[in-house]
Image (cartoon, rainbow, N blue to C red):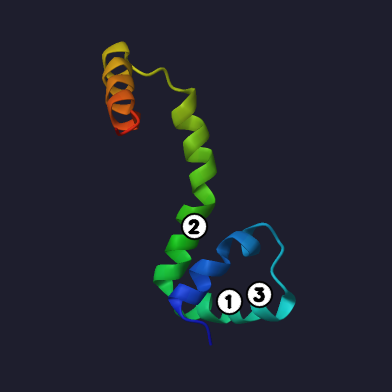
């Protein structure tokens, strides 16, 4: 039986339909007994849509300026 850590490490292949049948069966067994992993999988699947929605929103000008300033300061090459 897979652990939560094992299951999370397999999610990308599982969601993409690339998980070998035997591993998928073990993952389904774990998901049948683990509400936490089922919830994690639901959020994992929802993440791309959420990111698309957030990126479609117009960022307030003041926030955009502060974010750019912050990133420039953090990304400066260190002497």
Q: Quadrant of residue 26?
A: bottom right
Residue at the image point whose x is 48% and y is 31% from the top: 53
Give the side of residue 16 with respect to residue 39, left or right: right
Mark 3 residue element: helix
Of mark 1 and mark 2, the one earlier in the sequence is 1
Q: Which residue is mark 3?
A: 24
Of mark 2 and mark 3, the one earlier in the sequence is 3
Residue 71: image x %, image y %?
Answer: 33, 27
Residue at the image point whose x is 53% and y is 39% from the top: 49
Q: 21 or 62: nearer the eye?
A: 62
Q: Which residue is mark 2?
A: 42
Q: Disc 1 or disc 2, which is closer to the eye?
A: 1
Q: Disc 2 or disc 3, which is closer to the eye?
A: 3
Q: Which residue is mark 1?
A: 27
Mark 2 near mark 3, Cβ–Cβ under 8 Å? no
Cα separation between marks 2 and 3: 16 Å
Residue furthest top as drawn: 61
Residue 59: image x %, image y %?
Answer: 37, 19
Position of the C terminus, as image quadrant, is: top left
Mark 1 residue element: helix
Mark 2 residue element: helix
Residue 30 vertical placement versus 70 (above, below): below
Cα separation between marks 3 and 1: 5 Å
Mark 1 near mark 2, Cβ–Cβ under 8 Å? no
Mark 3 near mark 1, Cβ–Cβ under 8 Å? yes
Q: Which mark is residue 60?
A: none
Cα separation between marks 1 and 2: 14 Å
Give the side of residue 51 with respect to residue 20, left or right: left
Q: Quadrant of residue 18?
A: bottom right
Q: State the count of labels.
A: 3
Mark 2 closeness class: few <14, some 14–19, many ≥20 residues within 10 Å: few
């Amino acid at each position: 039986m897979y652990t939560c850590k094992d299951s999370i490490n397999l999610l990308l292949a599982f969601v993409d339909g690339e998980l070998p049948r035997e591993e998928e069966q073990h993952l389904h067994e774990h998901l049948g007994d683990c509400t936490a992993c089922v919830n994690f999988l639901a959020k994992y699947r929802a993440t791309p849509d959420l990111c698309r929605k957030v990126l479609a929103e117009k960022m307030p000008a003041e926030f955009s300026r502060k974010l750019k300033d912050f990133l420039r300061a953090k990304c400066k090459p260190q002497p």
